[in-house]
């Protein structure tokens, strides 16, 4: 699907060359690794203040959890074609990367995640059915900010992977597509490494989304100052 859409905008492909030619500075790669870790750390801190959070030893901690961390370079290469086409599409769709365009794109991209399970949402509206969209929107918006600020496809792809990894490895996910695509094809879910009480999963999603959106806003603010 991405390839088809890119083909329709083939006359504008020259606009992606600056992003393709820019590998980014090493310190910026490190920053895009550290920020999702900080966001997760702050999320845990907030949870500990309003609820109860304890470490638990999940099943397949070594096989899935630790191995996923060491396999990040492998999954970077494995998912590179998909993520590269996605980043190219983002550049073509919101070439000037204004704040409103980026916000609208992030919202529309997030809504697209409803389509695989739209039948269960239309049956009965329940807020918990939509809670997973919060971290999705947060991660998308944050990474559009990363792409706008660093103007590097390579850093942006790495940032997408690390932000997904940080959230899923710590808090878990039952989205089989996400797990099989970015982690391991032999697993369909991951429970995370913490047991949380007194607050709901939806609250965790909201806290994480708010924090990572905040960091995304910083990228837009700093980029605006840089271009003045």
Image (tube, grey):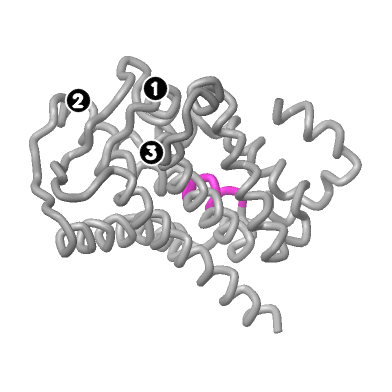
Observer-nearest residue: 18 or 201?
A: 201
| Mark 1 residue element | helix
Q: Position of residue 91 (x, y in %)?
A: 72, 50
| Mark 2 residue element | helix
Residue under numbered circle 1: 176
Residue under numbered circle 3: 128
CA separation in Å, label 3 and label 2: 30 Å
Question: Of tags 1 and 3, which is closer to the observer?
Answer: 3
Is 66 drawn above or below residue 17 in the view shown? above
Observer-nearest residue: 39 or 157?
A: 39
Observer-nearest residue: 75 or 92?
A: 92
Q: Main secondary structure of the magenta part?
A: helix
Task: Looking at this view, name the residue that lies furthest to the front.
Answer: 124
Kindly indicate whether the residue at mark 2 contacts the one at mark 3 (C-beta within 8 angstroms): no
Q: Position of residue 99 (x, y in %)?
A: 67, 65
Q: Which residues are magenta?
A: 153-160
Q: Quadrant of residue 56?
A: top left
Q: Which residue appears at 39% of the width and 60% of the height?
A: 30
Residue under numbered circle 2: 63
Q: Earlier in the sequence, mark 3 or mark 2?
A: 2
Instruction: Assign the C terminus to one quadrant of the image.
Output: bottom right
CA separation in Å, label 1 and label 2: 17 Å
Q: Position of residue 53 (x, y in %)?
A: 12, 51
Q: Position of residue 12 (x, y in %)?
A: 87, 46
Kindly indicate whether the residue at mark 3 contacts the one at mark 1 (C-beta within 8 angstroms): no
Q: Which residue appears at 57% of the width and 76% of the height?
A: 222
């Amino acid at each position: 699907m991405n390839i088809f859409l890119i083909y329709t905008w083939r006359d504008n492909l020259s606009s992606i060359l600056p992003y393709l030619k820019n590998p980014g500075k090493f310190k910026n790669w490190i920053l895009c690794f550290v920020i999702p870790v900080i966001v997760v750390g702050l999320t845990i801190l907030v949870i500990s203040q309003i609820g109860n959070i304890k470490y638990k030893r999940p099943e397949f901690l070594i096989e899935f959890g630790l191995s996923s961390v060491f396999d990040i370079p492998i999954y970077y290469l494995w998912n590179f074609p998909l993520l590269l086409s996605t980043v190219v599409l983002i550049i073509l769709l919101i070439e000037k990367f204004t704040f409103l365009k980026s916000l609208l794109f992030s919202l529309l991209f997030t809504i697209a995640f409803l389509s695989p399970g739209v039948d269960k949402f239309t049956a009965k509206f329940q807020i918990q059915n939509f809670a997973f969209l919060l971290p999705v929107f947060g991660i998308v918006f944050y990474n559009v900010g990363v792409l706008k600020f660093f103007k590097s496809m390579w850093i942006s792809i790495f940032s997408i992977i690390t932000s997904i990894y940080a959230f899923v490895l710590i808090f878990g996910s039952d989205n089989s597509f996400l797990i099989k695509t970015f982690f391991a094809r032999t697993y369909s879910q991951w429970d995370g490494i913490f047991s949380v009480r007194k607050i709901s999963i939806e609250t965790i999603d909201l806290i994480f989304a708010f924090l990572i959106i905040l960091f995304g806003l910083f990228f837009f603010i700093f980029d605006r100052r840089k271009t003045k």
